[in-house]
Structures are given as C-alpha cells and as structure tokens.
C-alpha cells in the first residue's frame, strides 16, 4: 500500500463529493454516456483508497439525485444496471474495511436494488476504516422535509438538534470539505442543511479524471484554510 504524502496541518474528518462530469467525459471521447459512469466508479475507488490512506473517517458521494429521474429512461435504466453490478461485484469495501450506507428514497430504486443495498449495509456493518455513504434518489430539500414531517408526527419541538437527529444523515458528522468536479459551482440540492459551514473546493477536472493527485490537492487546499464557523 502506498505511503501517504504528508499534508499540511489538518485532514478533514468528513469529505463529501458531487461527482460531476461523467457525461461530458464520455461525449468528448465519442463514447456512450454509460462509459463515463463506468469510469466514474473507477474514480470513486481511487478516492476511497485515498481516504483510507489518510485516515478520513467519512466519505459521502452524490450518486443519483432525485432530479436525475427526469433523464431519458434508457439512461436511467443503464445507471440502475451499473448500480446493480457495483453492489453485486465490488469487493473493495470488505477488503479495505469500508462500511457502506445509502441515503435517499431507496424504494424508488426498485425492490431488487433496495434488497442489495440492505445486504451490503449488513455485510459491512462491522467495518470501521471508512464510512462510505452513497446518496441515491436523494434531494437535500426532501431530506429536510421528511425530517420536519417526522418531528410533526412525533409532536416534537422543531429545533436544530431535533432536526439533525432525524435527517437521513443523522449517523454522520457534517462534512468538513465538499468537493465538486467538472467546473460547476453549485450544490445542486445536495446536503443543504449539512454543508452550512463546510469548506468548498471546486475543480474543472471531470469526475472520471479525478485521480489520487487531484484528491490530494483538494485535501491540501482544505488543510491550508482557517475555519471560523461564522465567528
């Protein structure tokens, strides 16, 4: 295993990534869009490896948004097939000590995918090296809405602590660093509550080209910042 190069000062406990640019990567090479998504999985594996090497505790990635259901049905079907393959075939989680969780409206993904997710979550539940969370059929606004609805049903006070306790992300700390690839500079409805004080890092690199060096550059940028949390 590669020895991590030293980073200045601090490593984030929780990194969140909006993995953007798979389609543009494929189109630039005259390939079907699904080939970009396949290369995107390779990029995710690289980032998992970097997180494990540097001792990052949490990695949360935006895999499929609630808005993505509006894509052409063929593209959605291809993505669901790729997700099935990833859940069935990927052995890296257990080998690397990675615990998998999924947030979002998983029922919309279909019974077979929801069942596979549940199996992988159970199989990796004792892993402690890295907490990998994939947001699927996810919307930051819906996350907040379902939290409010839950509190209203339970007749609980709507406070920051109570809301935080019923968000889909209640098991994780807020992201310290949020990375977005492909040159876009917006949240796109991802973790709206949780990123209130996150440090943002934007790069023009398309997600399939986001390699170990690119990840280390993002971590170095974070380490050079002074976080004040509004103070």
Image: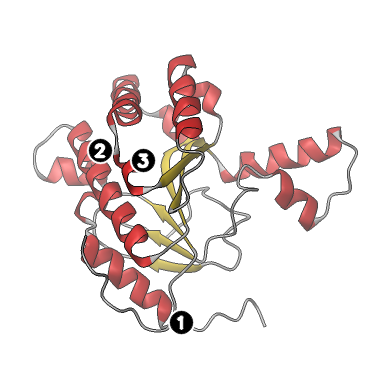
Q: Residue at x 25, y 49 (%)?
A: 43
Quadrant holding the C terminus? bottom right
- Quadrant location of residue 71? top left
Residue at 63% from the left image edge and 76% from the top image edge:
229
Q: Is residue 69 above or below residue 53?
A: above
Residue 64, percent across and down? 42, 37
Instruction: Quickly name the residue at label 3.
Output: 94
- Residue 126, image x and y in percent? 50, 42
121 relative to 219 in the view: left or right: right
Tell me which residue sits at (29%, 69%) in the image.
216
Mark sitting earlier along the chain (3/2): 2
Q: Residue 225 — which label?
A: 1
- Secondary structure state at the residue bearing disc 2: helix
| 3 or 1: tag closer to the N-terminus | 3
Task: Point out the tag, 2 or 1, that comes first from the N-terminus.
Answer: 2
Res 146 label = none
Is the residue 12 above or below the residue 57 in the image? below
**Does the image show residue 5?**
yes
Label 2 crowd (10 A; few <14 / some 14-19 / many >=20): many
> Where residue 93 appears, x then y in whole percent?
36, 42
For the question of whether residue 182 can be seen, the reply is: no
Tag of residue 37:
2
Q: Is residue 51 left or right of residue 139?
A: left
| Position of residue 126 in the picture relative to residue 211 (left or right) | right
């Amino acid at each position: 295993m590669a020895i991590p190069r030293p980073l200045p000062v601090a490593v984030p406990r929780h990194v969140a990534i909006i993995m953007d640019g798979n389609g543009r990567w494929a189109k630039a090479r005259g390939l079907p869009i699904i080939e970009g998504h396949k290369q995107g999985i390779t990029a995710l594996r690289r980032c998992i490896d970097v997180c494990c090497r540097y001792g990052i505790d949490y990695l949360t990635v935006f895999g499929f948004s609630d808005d993505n259901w509006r894509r052409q049905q063929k593209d959605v079907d291809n993505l669901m097939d790729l997700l099935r393959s990833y859940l069935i075939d990927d052995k890296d989680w257990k080998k690397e000590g990675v615990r998998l969780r999924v947030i979002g409206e998983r029922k919309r993904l279909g019974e077979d995918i929801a069942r596979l997710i549940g199996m992988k979550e159970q199989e990796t539940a004792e892993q402690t090296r890295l907490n990998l969370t994939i947001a699927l059929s996810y919307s930051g606004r819906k996350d907040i809405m379902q939290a409010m609805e839950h509190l209203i049903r339970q007749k609980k006070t709507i406070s920051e602590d109570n809301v935080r306790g019923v968000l889909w992300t209640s098991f994780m700390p807020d992201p310290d660093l949020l990375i977005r690839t492909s040159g876009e500079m917006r949240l796109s409805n991802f973790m709206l509550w949780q990123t209130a004080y996150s440090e943002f890092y934007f790069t023009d690199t398309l997600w399939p080209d986001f390699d170990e060096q690119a990840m280390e550059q993002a971590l170095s940028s974070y380490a050079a910042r002074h976080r004040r949390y509004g103070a």
